[in-house]
Image: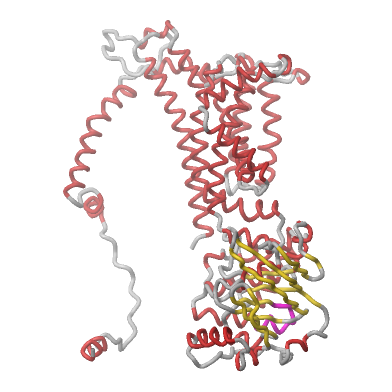
Amino acid sequence: MVERPDDPSMAAPREEVAVEVAGLHKWYGDFHVLRDINLKVLRGERIVICGPSGGGKSTLLRCINRLEDWQRGRVVVDGIELTDDPKRILAVRRDVGMVFQQFNLFPHLTVLENCTLAPIWVRRMPKRDAEALAMSYLERVKIPDQASKYPARLSGGQQQRVAIARALCMGPNIMLFDEPTSALDPEMVKEVLDTMVELAGDGITMLVVSHEMGFARQVADRVIFMDEGQIVEVNAPKEFFSHPRHERTRLFLKQILHLAGGSGPQPLAGEPSS
Amino acid sequence: MSAIGDQSLLYVRRSPADRLPPPAARAGALGWLRTNLFSSPANIVLTLGCVLFIVWAVPPLLRFFLIDAVWSGTDPDACLASPAQPHPGACWAFVRVWYSYFVYGFYPIGQRWRVDLFFLALAFGVVWLLRLSAPRRDIGALYFFVVLPVLSFVLLHGAPWIGLRVVPTALWGGILVTVVVATIGMVASLPLGILLALARRSEMPVVKLFAVIFIEFVRGVPLITVLFMASVMLPLFVPEHLAPDKLVRALIGVALFASAYMAEVVRGGLIAVPRGQYEAARALGLSYRRMTGLVILPQALRVTLPNIVNTFIGLFKDTTLVFIVGIFDFLRTIEAARADPKWAAPTTTVTGYVFAALFYFVCCYGMSRYARNVEARLTRSDRR
């Protein structure tokens, strides 16, 4: 079982901090998209961020590997403070894997080449080692037989699993998932979530922007609710779903759980291995 | 409501539908004719019109260029009307006599083997580089971009220390010059164009401004102006002994002109690459150069390949404009030959121009076919 402190503050003594966001503000033109975000993510912690669209969830996630810059505040990842210095940015990105809503596989490369590109060119790994590594991760996401195909020949669920394998090939300490199942057909959501549940069992630090409440309930150490560029509520999943503290959270949960069939978050097939 | 419900129930399947082979297409030549040429009244009219046009136009052309044509003869009289041939056709004898002039210009006759060797080396390099199935294309690229330029310079210009006498570029001419200008223009314009396109999309304002000014200025000026500036104005700013050769000046002008166009073509390809590709590459920790070289450019050049070849074809034909600065390219040699009063038969001019058209067409069509091949191959390999 995943360790789940009921009180989020109890997580504090656990080891070191993987990501620290302090007083983060970001504007798109006049639009204040992130307002005073403060967040500490501990190593090995699994965090699900949810909230209405336009609330700044993805933007916050993308600040952590500096795909977005910000105007005020600081972000420290694995002890490296992100600044304009390209060396720091590259160092952080090497350590932080990211999975996108639209998969973003490289269409001109085969599945295997997608996975070996960064290990070969960024980690300077010999080609043979990189391929062996990539195959081991493709086996973990259960598509080793597709290795020589081009991404366009794969289903959405398969593409997203390749994207996860591609990120894992860099051996990241932290994984960011930006709505990884939102672009998938319903019958493919589960295969991707199962992969993520399995990954969560490995103790990698995960930040997941998602509306999959079943996943949040099963895997998350903390659930963060964001709205209008602010963190409205941070809570342990059990508390979050049964006793949301904030009125706005209550309304949001009511809306999305109603959409899911009104029967509350559905558990996934496999419990995470401990 | 219930009636509709009952009705739809009638369509519930009781057994699985068999898989059937697709129906045979309407076969036979007659079927093809009917669907493609005679499917509607308008189509019938068009078909008949085209047939009539072909019947009207093709036989006279065949008669003039093949049947009545004068194929042999070493003097102009062969192409003049005489009792034996009251209506002489195309004067291919003229092309045969002047052929070596068309190919080499005034290149000294004893040294022309060097030009032949250059053509061979170039053809070898082109095939090695462009045949996708050729072995070790990395060495092929090295040969084409490093060895071949040096070899060509030594061969064509000469190197006294190994016994090849110097042939000044003023003596070069004909197809030799056209091939040299076109090849260097293409080979230089692609990398330059890529750099300019990247610069124009750069976030660094100075780099971007430079690229925008260069591209817009060069594109906004006719090639003839660029050539004039390169050949007339450049010497005004550079001391005479440093002024580059006339052909080199024209080459620089053509290359810069073509690279401005190429930059816009490549930029179109860069725009077509989705933002997510940049983000995925950056999220993996690839530096700007790696991201550009490994992820963005391969995709951008792929979608823009037809446009690149289009630009190359345009450039190939634009090389004819170098005559304006006194360089004897292929078309200019034909001009010179047809103006020779000795060959003042009425048919020589037409024949000369048709010969030139044939040459340009074969080269451009070859490029076009090659590009279609590569496109088909790329489509097969990575699309559904």
Whole-percent x and y of residue B296?
61, 53
Q: In which quarter of the image is residue A12?
A: bottom right
Q: Which residue is drawn at 76% across and 64% down?
A: A82
Q: In this orientation, does residue A126 appear?
A: no
Q: In which quarter of the image is the N terminus of chain B?
A: bottom left
Q: Nearer the viewer, residue A20 or A153?
A: A20
Magenta part of the protein: which range? A196-206
Colour scheme employed for the rendering of this structure: secondary structure
A101 over A109 or under it: above or below: below
Q: In this view, does A3 lie above or below A191?
A: below
The residue located at (33%, 79%) in the rendering is: B18
Above or below — where is A59 with respect to B296? below
| Front-lying residue, A1 or A168 | A1
Magenta highlight on residue B354: no
Can you give x and y, in whole percent of width and height, for residue A205 in the image? 73, 78
User: From the viewer's perspective, is A188 left or right of A37?
Assistant: left
Q: x%, y% of residue B54?
A: 25, 34
**Residue furthest to the left:** B41
